[in-house]
Structures are given as structure tokens and as C-alpha cells.
Image (cartoon, coloured by chain):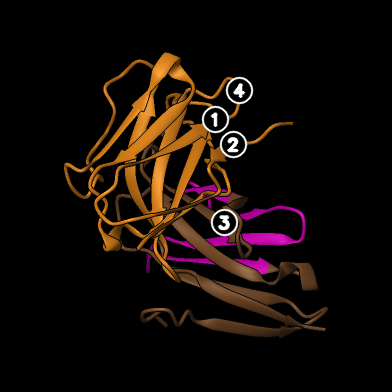
Chain colours: A orange, B brown
Amino acid sequence: GAGVSQSPSNKVTEKGKDVELRCDPISGHTALYWYRQSLGQGLEFLIYFQGNSAPDKSGLPSDRFSAERTGGSVSTLTIQRTQQEDSAVYLCASSPGQNSYSNQPQHFGDGTRLSIL
Amino acid sequence: GESVGLHLPTLSVQEGDNSIINCAYSNSASDYFIWYKQESGKGPQFIIDIRSNMDKRQGQRVTVLLNKTVKHLSLQIAATQPGDSAVYFCAEGDAYGNNRLAFGKGNQVVVIP
């Protein structure tokens, strides 16, 4: 079946430009997550959406970062006025959603590799 | 050991041997643990998970062991194959949904044919 789809797979842009990264979660998954992975490092949590609840934005590194999830499906991560330290792989994951004491694995896309010149 | 910068801890294993990858977690309140495999240029792929009310869980060729006393997690891979070469990450989360996973820095596994 279709997994998590992210686009573009690669993005190169100049410092100071804005970028938008897109994530299509697995159909029917109500939970969606964004992470950032710097070269050779683990994953850093950015933001989490669950259904119609207010998103958990506690991982966003600065106010230049924002994310939306329209219609409970597709999500867009926007980085304004990009800086060189924003260069990383941005990964999106989805899971079926929360249930009382029911943890479900997050399933990841292959990410967008962002390079800021 | 801990990774420093770009240098991940690396485990080299002969094809057919068993592999053991270790992970120390930090939050004693974490109730959910999960292992991912990441190949170059790909996103993390789910391997196996375990809840804190269990000490051991087995999957196909993989076993996860959880020692809550010392906050230690391990992944055992039986009969390691060349396709097992990848970076392996452990992650921890809370009991009521895994809305925020905290990932370790990863361990590189290299399978020698």
C-alpha cells in the first residue's frame, strides 16, 4: 500500500528564501509528525498534529518555522528566511492516532533533503 | 558508546552471526520503546516496539530486550544478512500515545559477507 509521501525529495535554495515542504500521510492516519535530521544525527522532533486538536509545536526551533495541516490530511512545513543551519533532512511520519494506552508505530516518509547555500 | 559529530558507533558483524545493538534511554517515565532501521537516503523503517510492562518481545529474526532498572534497551538480530547493514535508532515515548518520540543518535551496523 501507499506509504508516507514527501515532496520535493531534494531542495536547494539560497539563504534568506522561504521554502515549503509537503507531506502526504498514510490514508486514514490521524496523527502526523515532522522531524529534522542533521547529518549523522538522530531525529529531532519539530511538531505533531492529532486530528482536529491544536498541534504540539514545542519542537519548532524558531518562529521562522511553521506548519499546517489542512483537512486533516496533507501537511506543509514552511521555513521562512532560511539560514544555513536549516540544512538537514526533514522527515514526516504518520500513525493511526491516539488510543488510550495504545501506542502505534510512526511510519516515515523518505524525507526532503534541504540544502541552504 | 555515544556518537560524536558524524562518527556513529559502528558494529561490524560477519554474515550469519547474531548482532546486538544497545541503547541507553534517559527518561524513567518513558513507557514505550521502538527500534527503527535507516538505510542511506531513506526514512526510518519500523522494526519492533515494546511497552514497559514487558521485558522481551520477539519478531521475525529480531528480539528487543528492555531492562527498566538500568534504563537499557537492546535489539538482537539473528543470522545477520547483508541487507541488515544500516543505521539503527532506538526511540522512547510516553504511555498514552507516542506523540513525541525521543530518538537516540544511532548505531551503524556493517555486515561483512
The amino acid pointed to by label 4 is Ser
Residue at the location (38% across, 37% down)? Answer: B99
Q: Nearer the viewer, residue A41 or B52?
A: A41
Q: How far, Cα to Cα, is label 3 from label 1?
A: 18 Å
Q: B94 above or below A86?
A: above
Please identify, in this view, whether the residue under mark 3 or under mark 1 is nearer the observer: 1
Q: A31 above or below B40?
A: above
Q: Give the chain of mark 4.
A: A
The residue carrying mark 3 is B36
The amino acid pointed to by label 1 is Pro
- Residue A43's quadrant in the figure? bottom left
Chain-order first, disc 1 or disc 2: 2
Q: How crowded is mark 4: few (under 14 residues within 10 Å), some or many (20 or more)?
A: some
Q: Nearer the viewer, residue B64 or B14?
A: B14
Query: Residue B60 magenta-drawn?
Result: yes
The reply to whether callout 3 and callout 2 are in contact (CB within 8 Å) is no
The residue carrying mark 2 is A4
The residue carrying mark 4 is A27
Q: Is A58 situated left or right of A9 in this image?
A: left
Q: How crowded is mark 2: few (under 14 residues within 10 Å), some or many (20 or more)?
A: many
Q: Do labels 4 and 2 share a chain?
A: yes
Q: Give the chain of mark 2.
A: A
Residue stretch in magenta: B49-76
Q: Which secondary structure, mark 2?
A: loop
Q: Where is residue A84 shown, x and y percent of the image?
A: 28, 62
The residue carrying mark 1 is A25
Q: Which secondary structure, mark 4?
A: loop
Q: Are marks 1 and 2 on the same chain?
A: yes
Q: Do labels 4 and 1 share a chain?
A: yes
